[in-house]
Amino acid sequence: MVQLHPHLFARKRKEPFPARSVLLRLLDRVIYIVGIVGPLMTIPQLAKIFLLHDASGVSLYTWGGFTLLDIPWILYGVAHRERPIVMTYTLWFFFNGLVFLGALLYGNPTF
């Protein structure tokens, strides 16, 4: 069995929050905006599904997969206390789950 050096698993020292660097502080702010705007971009898809009751062309498997794959990211963010990751992937989980639900209700899923 291969022995791995413990250093490979040691976490790097985290930059203090707020960061000392102006660019890192800007990035800290931008990432929250991106984390909110990204999931909101599913609203047109949700509007089509729930207002028109039309989920044609929406893959049940794809959106279900997206929803399930958000869970490990949320757990990772919680475990590492990374608020932007938790916030972003919780929003993605919610919006992806809504698209999945809409595809289930108004689509023509074939199993």
Image (tube, grey):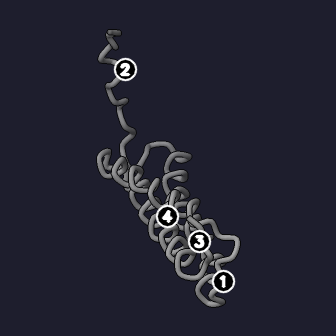
Rendered location of residue 5, percent (x, y) = 33, 13
Q: Which of the two discs, 1 and 2, labels the residue nearer the N terminus? A: 2
Q: Dot 3: what SS?
A: loop
Q: Which of the two discs, 3 and 2, labels the residue nearer the N terminus? A: 2
Q: Are the two marked residues, 1 and 3, in contact with CB atoms closer than 8 angstroms?
A: no
Taking depth in this image into account, of 28 and 80 the one nearest to the observer is 80
Which dot, 1 or 2, sits closer to the camera? 1
Which dot, 1 or 3, sits closer to the camera? 3
Q: Are the two marked residues, 1 and 2, in contact with CB atoms closer than 8 angstroms?
A: no
- Give the residue at mark 2: 8
Residue type at the position of mark 2 = Leu
Q: Farthest residue in the front direction?
A: 111
Taking depth in this image into account, of 31 and 57 the one nearest to the observer is 57
Q: How far apart are marks 4 and 3 (CA)?
A: 22 Å
Residue type at the position of mark 3 = Pro
Q: Distance between the residues labelled 1 and 4?
A: 21 Å
Quadrant location, the C terminus: bottom right
Q: Is residue 33 above or below residue 75?
A: below
- Give the residue at mark 4: 92
- Give the residue at mark 1: 54
Q: Dot 1: what SS?
A: loop
Q: Which of the two discs, 2 and 4, labels the residue nearer the N terminus? A: 2
Q: Dot 2: what SS?
A: helix
Q: Which of the two discs, 4 and 3, labels the residue nearer the N terminus? A: 4
Residue type at the position of mark 1 = Asp
- Give the residue at mark 3: 109
Rendered location of residue 14, percent (x, y) = 37, 37
